[in-house]
Image (tube, rainbow, N blue to C red):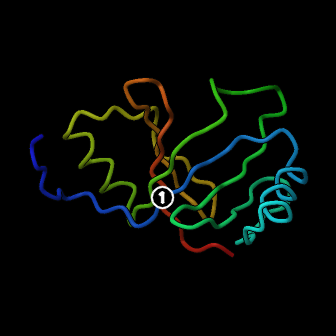
């Protein structure tokens, strides 16, 4: 196996986003049953639970049903979505649309070869 040296893109955190049917039930499961701390919550729109080595983001499924296949995506935290998109595009990554702003976050989405959604996430700060 070839040793790959570090390249320019710097990721500062990893997160897995789970699309959930019931936010209360999911928060209860991850915090009360698993005992993971709730890092932040934005009503029923978004919640973040901390686990060793990964951030678990909980996001409700769209009101009109699932917007995409599956219910899991992988997020990679970056300092600058624009800069990271440019670097990854030079390596053949194709993004689905432009940057999506959802304060305090900004996102850019793409898929791996098997269709798993991956997103770059730039955040100002969890509140």
- The quadrant of the image that shows the C terminus is bottom right
**Callout 1 crowding tier (Cα within 10 Å): few <14, some 14–19, many ≥20:** some
Label 1 sits on residue = 14
37 in relation to 19, above or below: below
Residue at x 75%, y 70% (from the top left corner): 38
Displayed quadrant of residue 70: top right
- The quadrant of the image that shows the N terminus is top left
Residue 7, x across and y down, in percent: 17, 56
72 in relation to 44, above or below: above
Displayed quadrant of residue 46: bottom right
Residue at x 48%, y 58% (from the top left corner): 14
Name the one closer to the observer, 84 or 55. Answer: 55
Residue at x 45%, y 60% (from the top left corner): 77
Circle 1 — which element?
strand
36 in relation to 111, above or below: below
The answer to whether 119 appears left or right of 36 in the picture is left
Name the one closer to the observer, 109 or 6. Answer: 6
């Amino acid at each position: 196996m070839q040793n790959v040296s570090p390249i320019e893109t710097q990721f500062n955190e990893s997160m897995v986003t789970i699309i959930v049917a019931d936010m209360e039930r999911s928060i209860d499961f991850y915090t009360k049953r698993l005992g993971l701390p709730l890092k932040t919550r934005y009503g029923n729109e978004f919640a973040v639970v901390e686990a060793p080595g990964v951030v678990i983001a909980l996001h409700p499924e769209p009101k009109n049903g699932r917007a995409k296949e599956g219910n899991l995506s992988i997020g990679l935290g970056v300092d600058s979505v624009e800069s990271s998109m440019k670097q990854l595009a030079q390596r053949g990554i194709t993004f689905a649309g432009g940057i999506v702003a959802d304060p305090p976050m900004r996102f850019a989405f793409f898929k791996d070869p098997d269709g798993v959604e991956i997103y770059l996430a730039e955040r100002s700060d969890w509140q």
